[in-house]
Amino acid sequence: MRDLLKRFVFPKYRGRVIVGVLCKIVEVIFDLLTPIIVARMIDVGVTGHDTGVVTHLGVLLMVFAVIGYCFTLVCQKMAALVSQGSGTDVRNALFEKVYELSSADVDDFGIPSLVTRITNDVNQVQVTVALGIRQLIRWPILAVGSMVAALLIDLKLGLVFLVCTPIIGLVFWYVMTQSVPFFKSMQSKLDQVSLVTREALSGIRVIRAFGRGGHETERFREAAEDQTATAIAVGKLSAVLNPAIFLVMNLGVVTILWVGGGRVNVGELTQGEIVAFVNYMTQTLLSVVYVANLVVTFTRGAASASRVMEVLDRTATISDEGNEPVKLSEGSSEVALTLDHVSFAYEGSEVDAVSDVTLDLGIGQTIGIIGGTGSGKSTLVSLVPRLYDVTSGAVRVFGSDVRRYPLDQLRAIVATVPQQACLVSGTIRENLCWRNADASDDELWEALTRAQAADFVREKPDGLDALVEAGGKNFSGGQRQRLTIARALVGHPKIVILDDSASALDFATDAHLRQALHDLRSELTTIVVSQRVSAVMSADQVLVLDHGSVAGLGPHRSLVRSCPLYREICLSQLKPEEVDV
Ligand SMILES: Nc1ncnc2c1ncn2[C@@H]1O[C@H](COP(=O)(O)OP(=O)(O)OP(=O)(O)O)[C@@H](O)[C@H]1O
Ligand SMILES: [Mg+2]
């Protein structure tokens, strides 16, 4: 919590925090003065039948109330400004950080947990910051102030305090020690609820199609009930807290009235003093209750703050710090991409997802990568734009290790079309301009034409400015794929990676796309990942992956003869006469 405050609250909002806290202190002072004035009203005004004093002091009380109220308003306003402002800052920082982190780091946290951290945990922190400004000062001052004021009125009656306060402290201590362990598990159970929700909602169409809705509903119910059970357990404990404290407090009041009544009779105390004393005592004990609640909120806030800071403090495992732009002089390298004994294992996995892959891809050439599902195709191509770093070996682009490039430069050279087409809400133009924000209409249309997307975009009344809904759901799967291919071609990349990006295209469109990319070969080197032999057989080389290892590498013609696995894949998809060209 302290780190978060130091980083996000104090530097930017120090002035507002101070104003807020000062206003609160003024408000508390007025609160502390009120019982004394009421006591005077009773002793001088009521007992002495002096209506003038009653009216004067009444007006004074009203003035106090109004002034106090004004200060409260200012304090609330400051608290809202600081908590909302710093909350937004934290959220923005988290978001920015997530994009700085490598894919491996993001995998490590898990998307649902990151979502909970950016939303729920930041909310929790906001509540804590606001409460900190509004209440943290108020209740302790009020508690101590009231206690001192009460003891000043009468020391002996103060003994009641000495008995009540430790009892309340004890009750509070019991409830706290019992409920704090629950808070942490509550937050991680919330992660679980959000994980199930996310999976079930993002896959709703598939889940429906497979008739698994009931199963998912059951899974959600289990996660939600688990979280509810914990919340109820905590609730039950908290439910004990307030009644127990009020019981102790009211017994204290009864004792004071009982003992104090006798002392008033013998003239040691006035009626007003007893009223003031009871007021101070209830104020003190109520303050203790509030402080207790504050401790609860702060414990939760601190747990959330540490989850937030965990993300912010994570150093990205992939960094380009200190990398100078690599000079790509013409003709210095004939090879666009080199994989030099490349192996990669995902964090926490014992087996290599890719192991010992070596190949050279000449400038302007095309390589097709084929293999069964899970054979490591996507993993291998994700090493080129450095979404992950190799575990051993090296990936070189135009002769230089990818780890020597500034990431911006590397990703300008290498354009990736991921397996999952990703479109965001906005316009087609906005979705196309990711790699070059200033791309001209001509450039966009050229990319669309090559990606075989120009026709359906032209049919839209708004053309390039046609709306794209969240996730591109107003486009078909094949249209989405073609738009993401067009996006990759904007900004003139030198290497383009198509990860199964034409899987939803019909054979004719797929062939046109391949031809269009082939026409660009003077400036573009292409990596095509596909499950279809037809998509890779015309490539200059074909890489056959099997459980992450190279099962075959070479042009189609020779592979058909030398690689049994490739031959098998070919025969399963093509007629024998098409295989042996
Ligand atoms: N983020 C990840 N974390 C851990 N393991 C992963 C991750 N992504 C993939 N894997 C594992 O790595 C292996 C290779 O996966 P990869 O996605 O590269 O296969 P693929 O050949 O692209 O399959 P497909 O044809 O289905 O797309 C698989 O065994 C998979 O379980
Ligand atoms: Mg894949």
Image (spheres, helix red, strand yellow):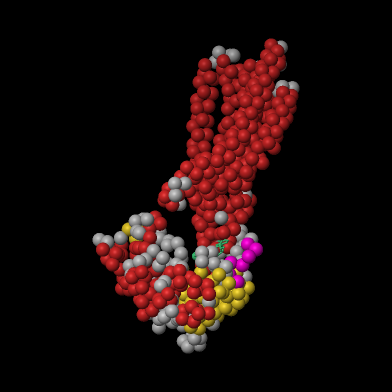
Magenta region includes residue 353: yes
Residue at position x 42%, y 78% in the image: 538
Question: Residue 465: x percent and y percent?
Answer: 30, 62
Q: So how many labels did they put on this image?
A: 0
The residue segment tinted magenta is 349-355
The residue closer to the viewer here, 316 or 135, is 316
The residue positioned 65% from the left and 23% from the top of the image is 247
Residue 34's place in the image compared with 293, above or below, is above
Picture layout, residue 255 above or below residue 348: above
Q: Position of residue 117 (x, y in %)?
A: 55, 51
Residue at 70% across, 33% down:
174
Q: Can I make out residue 212 in this image?
A: yes
Work out which residue is located at the far bottom of the displayed protein and give it: 331
Q: Outermost residue, front direction? A: 576
Determine if the magenta segment contains residue 370.
no
Question: Is any atom of residue 524 visible in this view?
Answer: no
Q: Main secondary structure of the magenta part?
A: loop
Q: Position of residue 38 (x, y in %)?
A: 58, 23
Which image quarter holds the C terminus?
Answer: bottom left
Q: Depth check: give the residue in front, 288 or 498.
A: 498
* Residue 353 drawn at (x, y percent): 58, 67
Q: Quadrant of residue 572?
A: bottom left
Q: Pick the residue in front: 40 or 144.
A: 144
Point 58% across, 56% down: residue: 109
Residue 446: quarter of image: bottom left
Q: Quick check: 439 left or right of 391?
A: left
- Determine whether, in the image, residue 497 is placed left or right of residue 345: left
Compared to 216, does 162 lie above or below?
Answer: above
